[in-house]
Amino acid sequence: MSDAPTPTSPRLARRRALVTGGASGIGAAIAARLAADGAAVVIRDFDDAAAKAQADRCDATAVRLDVTDPASARAAVAETGPFDILVNNAGIDHAGVFFTDVAPEQWRRLLAVNLEGVFACTQAVLPGMQRAGWGRIVNLSSEAGRVGGKADAVYAATKGAVIAFTRSIAMENGRYGITANAVAPGPIDTPLLRRMPPKAVDLVVGSTLLRRLGQPEEVAAAVAFLASDEAAYITAEVLGVSGGMFLQM
């Protein structure tokens, strides 16, 4: 039995979706929601076992992908594509480290996964979308990409770059019927966040208007909307899913 949400209608029926980093956390919720909405979902993740387990739970397909390797991205799309929907979700962070203490190999790794991975996967899927005359690209940014992040400068920089890249792709591909949008989560209740000290979690919760953590399924709902025909006239936008983070008076 799948624990995926039950759709009110198969709004993504006959669509094929690629979700990177879909093995756990927000990515797993996105894969489950797209599958529940009728899409044929392929989960691409570096963690084979976790990707397979999530694929079994939501009736998807799992294939290993190193998003930092453009050749791997092209091979993945050639093997299981073409795709109508691309969700660039894969990402990592080294929060809690001030920039003066960040080692070059750390920032290179963040750039490789969070930014170059988005480049590689987008370039791999775009030709098929252009030929089809339809496509949805949804990139996971972060509120840190819009406002910065204390002791998180490199992560914030990569997520800010994702926003600029998303808008540029939207500009280049609107004539093909392809939209590109970004989703910017705030504090979401994932295992990664729960590894933070409780006082740090309380601090980020206090920065939201709703005074709570978001759930991965709430991010997934935003992604599913942007991937659907209902969002056909929305492109080059950034949708915050953050409980009104940093807006409290």
Image (cartoon, rainbow, N blue to C red):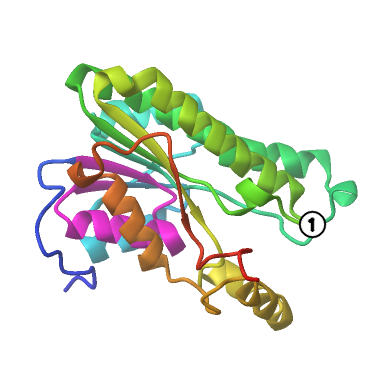
| Circle count | 1
Q: Quadrant of the C terminus?
A: bottom right
Q: Quadrant of the N terminus?
A: bottom left
Q: Secondary structure at mark 1?
A: loop
In the image, 89 versus 247, the foreground residue is: 247
Q: Is residue 34 magenta?
A: yes
In the image, 15 versus 68, the foreground residue is: 15
Residue at the front extreme?
A: 249
The image quarter in which residue 202 lies: bottom right
Residue at the right extreme?
A: 100
Q: How many residues crowd mark 1 within 10 Å: few (<14), some (14–19), many (20+)? A: some
Q: Is residue 198 above or below residue 217?
A: below
Residue at the image point whose x is 53% and y is 79% from the top: 212
Residue at the image point whose x is 72% and y is 54% from the top: 149
In the image, 195 versus 73, the foreground residue is: 195
Residue bearing mark 1: 151
Which region is colored magenta? Answer: 16-42
